[in-house]
Image: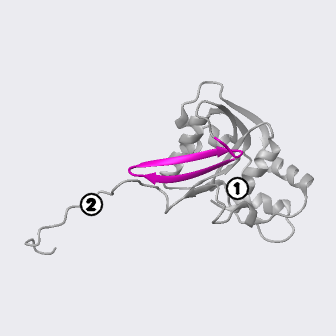
Amino acid sequence: ESAEGNWFCDLMLAARPDVQVAVTNGGGLRADMPAGELTYGQLYEANPFDNRFAIVDVKGAHLRKLVTSNLQRTGAILSWGGLAAKARCKADKLEVTITIAGKPLVEEAAYKLVTSDFLATGGDGLIGRLKLPEGSVKMTDVIIREAMADVLRKKKGTVDPGKLYSPTSRRLDFEGNRPIECGPKQVKPTRPSTEPDE
């Protein structure tokens, strides 16, 4: 999780007020934002791809699967907007508590998710593994970076990275490192002491 990833997702939500949740992949963040006056060039360096918005109709259970599977895998962590999750091992099972805009996620409730056309059309295997009904994904012609720039021009002001991410206010609250594994780890049997060392 990073302040930049959280910020980009918040900008996606601001550009698409008709959706509840935003998600992007860590691989899409290509440069840090320097301190000082923000320029379009810096935004371009951080988000150089001409990806378009995709709006995806999902159920709460789909969002849970996206969050949980990402926590249990290696590779880039997903960045979220509008969603927070707390994951803890209870015996051998990973229990994940999720809120959407501060309210508990409802498994059967319908939500709108905004993401990139890259992820929505199979990139990183993210949306494809949900096996959504036909027509669930709607593509747009709006370039995400351009929409974020429009939001920033209207909003102005300053950005405090400490309000977007800090160790005490994470959107993805989990212990240890990914991938999260619960339960006793398999221990390789030890060699009998009578065997010679190799």
As for residue 98 lying within the magenta part, the answer is yes
As for residue 116 lying within the magenta part, the answer is no
Q: In percent of the image, x 70 and y 64: which residue is there?
A: 31
Q: In percent of the image, x 86 and y 50: which residue is there?
A: 151
Query: Seen in the image, is 133 located left or right of residue 20?
Result: left
Q: In percent of the image, x 70 and y 56: which residue is there?
A: 6
Query: Seen in the image, is 69 located left or right of residue 4?
Result: left
On screen, residue 26 above or below 56? below
Q: Residue furthest left?
A: 194
Residue 84: x, y in percent? 64, 50
| Residue type at numbered disc 2 | Val
Q: Secondary structure at mark 2?
A: loop
Residue 79: x, y in percent? 65, 53
- State the residue position of label 2: 187
Label placed on residue 6: 1
On screen, residue 121 above or below 188? above
Q: Secondary structure at mark 1?
A: helix
Marks 2 and 1, how far apart at CA: 38 Å
| Residue type at numbered disc 1 | Asn
